[in-house]
Image (cartoon, rainbow, N blue to C red):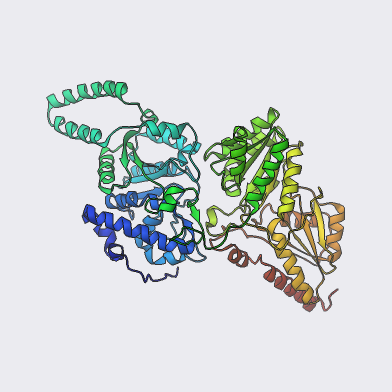
Amino acid sequence: MEKQKETMRYGLLDRDDLPSMLGSLTKEQLDELCGEIRQFLLDHVSQTGGHLASNLGVVELTIALHRCFDTSRDRLLFDVGHQCYTHKILTGRKDAFGQLRQFGGISGFLKPSESIHDACITGHASSSISVAQGMAHARTLLGEDYSVVAVIGDGALSGGMAYEALNSAGASKEPLIVVLNDNNMSIDKNVGAMSRHLQHLRVQPEYIRMKQDVKQVLDRSRVGERAANWISRSKRAVKSMVLQCSMFEQMGFTYLGPVDGHNVLAICDLLQIAKDMKKPVLIHVKTKKGKGYSYAEQQPNKYHGVSKFNIATGQPLKKAVTNFSTEFGKELVRLAKTNPKICAITAAMPSGTGLGTFSQLYGNRFFDVGIAEEHAVAMTAGMAKQGLRPVCALYSTFLQRAYDQLIHDVAIDHVPIVLGIDRAGIVGEDGATHNGVFDVGFLRQIPGMTLLAPSSYAELRGMLRSAVQHTDGPIALRYPRGGEGAYTEDHWQGQAAVCLREGTDVALVSYGIMINEALQAAALLEAHGVSAAVYKINILTAAFSDEFLRQVSRCGRVAVIEDVMHAGGVGQALAETLALQQIQMNWIRLFHTDSSFAPQGAVRQIYEYYHLDGNTVAKTCLEAIQHEKEHTGRSSI
């Protein structure tokens, strides 16, 4: 990893001994350091893009955690990892922030291969408590001595996995600290019963501290032990009358808080108490998302994930343009206007999936279930079973969580739900945990599933219109992050595959946004005297027709370009079909994301990394044709 040396000065933040001296800083120095870190974050994220509001909100909390724990030994987990930037700054990666989320730079999430201070990989929500409990069990069984702390946001608590973990961890009695970062937001406004429950929890830190002090005094004598038992019984009775018992206590956790999440010393007090308890403890920390930057404080959802922006105005440096998500939302609104049975479902992503306008116009038909993709898909199935036309919009990377529901609750019973699979393919800077490169493989193997791949806004609109009228089982549309490319045509009239360009020497086959790379490669090949046909697949789950196979085989050479994993992809299926039908080809080339986890970086860089870009596809085909000519002494070109 190449570091970019920092030229700006930030006072305390620039000191080489900062991590080790955190414990000795005064309140005034801590406040100064928090301000420096916020300025550092603004200076860098405004230039690289990244997750801003969440990181501004946890500066004090992260400093408190590093004052109380040694993350080279103690295990500190940030759920999702959106809020790990201060942690990275404090663990030796400050000078690398010029390359944050860039190709070859540091990740925007926890990444153990990057630092010993990163306990585990992160990127998806609600898993931190499960992983933390596993680490706590390992510590105990191996006879080791370190603390395990999981930091989870109130938004992530809408995910079912978090409750499974709380239930198990509380019953285990294993020493474990869960820090609940409560900012009343996930990406959009939090929803659900848990959000309302947190608003009513009011157990003061002073009460906990007094209880600890009294217990220490009474534990010194036999009389005190009897008194402590009596006080404990009385305390439970009084508390049940005066204070609303939290669900966390009912699950076996000791609940501490809420505490001001922007008071380092107050947080440290509760962390020390929790550490001394040697049992499952949950600390409720109240923070403000976007803290210290007025634009982010006022609109935390807008500044959750940002591109490069002007700090003074808060405006992005690149003008926002329409994209597949917004076009999807617009078309769904148009369809819902004339069809009262159409409903929209999403999992904590109304703005990200383009459903903001739908939620405003048709609030009674819009359902945000929180970070709960499994529930979203199963609920969608229930709605469809009873006669509604539900459309469930999820990111490809998060749809992976609902694989079981797609099979069990949807496909087996042939339920006609509609899936909008956003961020399909390569998404770029968020890296391996967010690239949508698995959906084609796992959806193509589900019996009865129909998978459509629009390549332009016009095709997206047409396919969505077809999808809401589709009653023969589940149907899904996969579309990329961002906007359309040079291809803006509409070749969707229900055909599984269409020919965009005639050719005789090589057949280039692709779908979705990658059709732009195929068309570019065909133009480059033509410039070198090679006639390239371009075929666009519209329905990825349809069997290849005899006519399509005849057209491809006439070229004698075929190259398939797709932005997904090799296994289960269209290229693999086509190669298998040609082999099984004993159709002789000069050669077959499959361009895909290999069998590895795609790195972070700009989308164009990842295309080049995997040789998916039009230039490399053309070059590879030319080399294959030349190799063929050299070894056979002839060529049909």
x, y percent for residue 230:
20, 21
On the picture, is 99 further left or further right than 280?
right
Q: Is residue 345 visible?
A: no
Judge left or right: residue 80 versus residue 281: right
Closer to the camera, 377 or 491? 491
Quadrant holding the N terminus: bottom left
* Residue at image point 66% right, 46% down: 330
Q: Residue at x 82, y 50 (%)?
A: 495
Counting from the top left corner in percent of width and height, residue 631 is at 78, 76
User: Residue 246: x and y, percent?
Assistant: 37, 29
The vertical placement of 253 against 18, above or below, is above
The answer to whether residue 429 is seen in the rendering is: yes
x, y percent for residue 197: 42, 31
Residue nearer the viewer, 587 or 376: 376
Q: Quadrant of residue 244?
A: top left
Q: In the rendered image of this protein, does residue 214 appear above or below residue 111?
A: above
Residue most extreme to the front: 313
59 to 466, vertically: above or below:
below
Position of residue 180 relative to residue 564, above or below, is above
Residue 31, quarter of picture: bottom left
